[in-house]
Image (cartoon, rainbow, N blue to C red):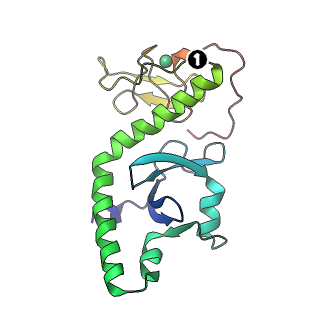
Amino acid sequence: MKNAHQPHVWWGYHRQHGWVVFDRSWPGNKYGRDGMIALVQCADWRVFEDSYRAWQEAILGQSSDYQYAPEYIERLPTYDERRLAENHLRHLQQEYERRHDTLRKQLTEQRRVRFLRELGIKADPPLRRVPRVPRTATCWRCSRDLDNAVDPECGQCEWIVCPNCGACGCGYGYSGYRAFGNWEL
Ligand SMILES: [Zn+2]
Ligand SMILES: [Zn+2]
């Protein structure tokens, strides 16, 4: 299975979210950006954020909010339930491959909207899907390298939106934006 060769993708089961994916190759996910990580809730393919600590505590066995997929399946009471869960997980893993780029854009959009909201700027219209000219840039806010082949552009300012901190040209030069620490490049 393709997923077996992707050690950066962690599959698990969350007490409330159900099946979740935590992809450590996503911007800000390696150690948690501002202490937060982005995960995907597979039930409706929605990106949500949780504290890195909440995930880590589960990994260290200090909480059971998150369970590693193979362990969750192992604990199911009957053979039929385990087999069903395995099949379902396999289906979700294929879906994730198919939806990956869209989900990553969803995360960028959520971060852009949050960043602009903090500045009191209306985040509308949404991200542009197909950039006209291929180009790269560096985020003015967190210095991450940007590439419009993978990172979407803002429909308002047309700058490439940073998937790590959500900044685009709309907030450039604004004084008073929240100090941004603990990012990763
Ligand atoms: Zn940035
Ligand atoms: Zn913008």
Residue 132 image position (x, y, % from top left): 29, 17
Residue 67 image position (x, y, % from top left): 52, 70
Which residue sits at x=55%, y=25%? 167
| Mark 1 burial class by Cα count in 10 Å: few <14, some 14-19, many 20+ | few
Residue 161 image position (x, y, % from top left): 47, 26
Where the C terminus falls, by quadrant?
top right
Vertical order, 107 against 174 (above or below): below
Which residue sits at x=60%, y=24%? 117
Which quadrant of the structure image shows residue 115? top right
Residue 24 image position (x, y, % from top left): 49, 52
Circle 1: residue type: Ile
Observer-nearest residue: 181 or 21?
A: 21
Drawn side of residue 58 relative to residue 160, left or right: right
Q: Is residue 2 visible?
A: no
Question: Which residue matches tag 1?
Answer: 121
Which residue sits at x=28%, y=71%? 87
Where the N terminus falls, by quadrant?
bottom left
Vertical order, 64 against 124 (above or below): below
